Image: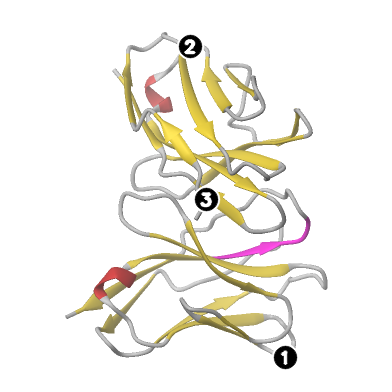
Amino acid sequence: DAKTTQPNSMESNEEEPVHLPCNHSTISGTDYIHWYRQLPSQGPEYVIHGLTSNVNNRMASLAIAEDRKSSTLILHRATLRDAAVYYCILIGNYGQNFVFGPGTRLSVLP
Amino acid sequence: EPEVTQTPSHQVTQMGQEVILRCVPISNHLYFYWYRQILGQKVEFLVSFYNNEISEKSEIFDDQFSVERPDGSNFTLKIRSTKLEDSAMYFCASSQYNEQFFGPGTRLTVL
């Protein structure tokens, strides 16, 4: 499985944008970049995914570098509810299991 | 919005006892998974299931573990003889394509 590297922790102020980086220098051409988050005492939750182009949905935006070796999850206005561990995961095929790293623990300050 | 459900939410058992953790995946999904998370640690893959058979399993998934889809809707994880180190949150997930939908988890406590 291709490996991802994320900072252990980040901090943000409420209502400010947050940029969560992920490095995946060994990504293969068919790997999708997925972002999940895990709120305290809950299961992982899908946030967004992409292949080559930047993606937007109601939760976040995903900016993918042109060489695909890194990506950034963007939360446009952090809320207290966004405090969670964020995981960047590479997936190549349907049904492939997820390999979770330690992720980035995001703290949101009021 | 459809969701993955898991029962029970918390299971307490004595070491050496058998436990069955139950999951109801999203109905049109084809791929099913079990993961576990020991307190304070990362989420770890246990097993994936497709077309009524195991498609992949990790080193953690030894002979003490088994999975079953007994009736076309439930997906179960059985631990035959629980050990103290089996205490963890167990998450079920299902997918149709790449995106996996996770259940809320079952907290297993082995005494």
Could you tell me if the residues under marks 2 and 3 are in contact, i.e. CB atoms within 8 Å? no
- Label 3: few (<14), some or many (≥20) within 10 Å? few
- Magenta-drawn stretch contains A89: yes
Bin the neighbour count of mark 2 within 10 Å (Cα to Cα): few under 14, some 14-19, many 20 and up.
some
User: Which chain does tag 2 point to?
Assistant: B
Q: Residue furthest right?
A: A29
Q: Amino acid at mark 1?
A: Glu
Provide the secondary structure element on which disc 3 rests: loop
Vertical relation: B54 (above or below) A63: above
Q: Secondary structure at mark 2?
A: loop
Question: Mark 1 and 2 residues: CB-CB less than 8 Å, in contact?
Answer: no
User: Is-magenta flag for residue A54?
Assistant: no
Quarter placement of the N terminus of chain A:
bottom right
* Mark 1 chain: A
Q: Nearer the viewer, mark 2 or mark 3?
A: 3
Does A106 sit above or below residue A37?
Answer: below
Residue toward you, B81 or A57: A57
Q: Which residue is mark 2?
A: B81
The spot of residue A22 in percent (x, y) is 55, 76
Please name the residue shown 41% across and 26% down the image: B85
- Is B82 on the left-hand or right-hand side of A31? left
Q: Could you tell me residue B50's position as x and y percent?
A: 75, 36
Residue shown at the point (45%, 35%) measured from the top left: B6
According to the image, label 3 marks what residue? B2
Residue range of the region highlighted in magenta in the rendering = A88-93
Tell me where residue A105 sits by quadrant. Answer: bottom left
